[in-house]
Amino acid sequence: MISELTNWQITLPMALAAAIAGYLLGSIPFGLILTRAAGLGDVRNIGSGNIGATNVLRTGNKKLAAATLLLDALKATVAAWIMAYVAGPEAGAIAGLFAFLGHLFPVWLGFKGGKGVATYIGTLLGVAPLFVLVFAAVWLTMAFIFRYSSLAALTAMLVIPVALWIFGYEKVAAVMAIMSVISYYKHKANISRLIGGTESKIGAKG
């Protein structure tokens, strides 16, 4: 699919359809739905107040956190795949971008959603699947060296647009760069803690 994303040809109505479909799928708050279904209450009332997998993990239920991570990723992948099948790869990229935005700013929750790492990966899987391996390699390397999950994710989101651009996929790189910038904004508290040396490390207790 990625090879087809170097030249964009899409009508405005189809672009709007892709955006709406992507946003609606992306705005499904799986973390909130799963924790409530499991009888754990509103995940927004614990930890960071986030609806993502990291905060779901603070309930102590690892399986629920893993399910949240998977579903938050796949909702973007599915959005991208469906729209790509219906209207071509450009529509898939737009749907993935708006699924990401839907996760971060869901209308159902007052536009207060997650930070977007899982949905970022899901979009990447939908539009440029081989580069998920690049993301994983960077994340694992940074996590192993520094033990900060947030730093690992932020670094990977910096590398991905550059890697895509280097390999000649400028349009896809632009889409992922937009998502990276927005996710950096959503991670501003983590960035402040990283600078201040107060960010929690992977495996840290308490």
Image: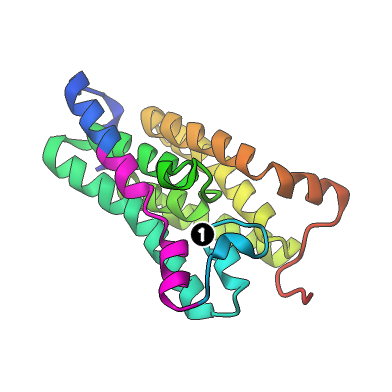
Q: Is residue 37 left or right of residue 83?
A: right
Q: Is most of the magenta stretch helix, strand or loop?
A: helix
| Residue 135, position as x, y percentages in the image | 51, 53
Q: Amino acid at mark 1?
A: Ala
Query: Which residue is at the front of the view, 15 or 155?
Result: 15
Crowding near the residue tagged with mark 1, few <14, some 14–19, many ≥20 C-alpha atoms within 10 Å:
some
Which one is nearer the viewer's eye here, 142 or 90?
90
Find residue 17 and report its horizontal and vertical position in percent. 21, 32
Quick check: can you spot residue 3? Answer: no
Residue drawn at (39%, 53%) of the image: 122
Tell me which residue sits at (24%, 27%) in the image: 15
Q: Is residue 36 magenta?
A: yes
Give x and y (percent) for residue 191.
74, 45
Please state the horizontal and vertical placement of residue 162, each as a whole percent of the image.
Answer: 53, 36
Q: Is residue 203 left or right of residue 49?
A: right
Residue in front for this viewpoint, 161 or 77: 77
Q: Residue at x 47, y 79 (%)?
A: 63
Magenta segment boundaries in residue numbering: 21-39
Q: Which residue, as the protein is rendered here, is positioned at the far left?
A: 86
The quarter of the rendered structure image containing the N terminus is: top left
Tag 1 residue? 136
Quadrant of the image containing the C terminus: bottom right
Residue 44 lies in quadrant: bottom right
SS for tag 1? helix
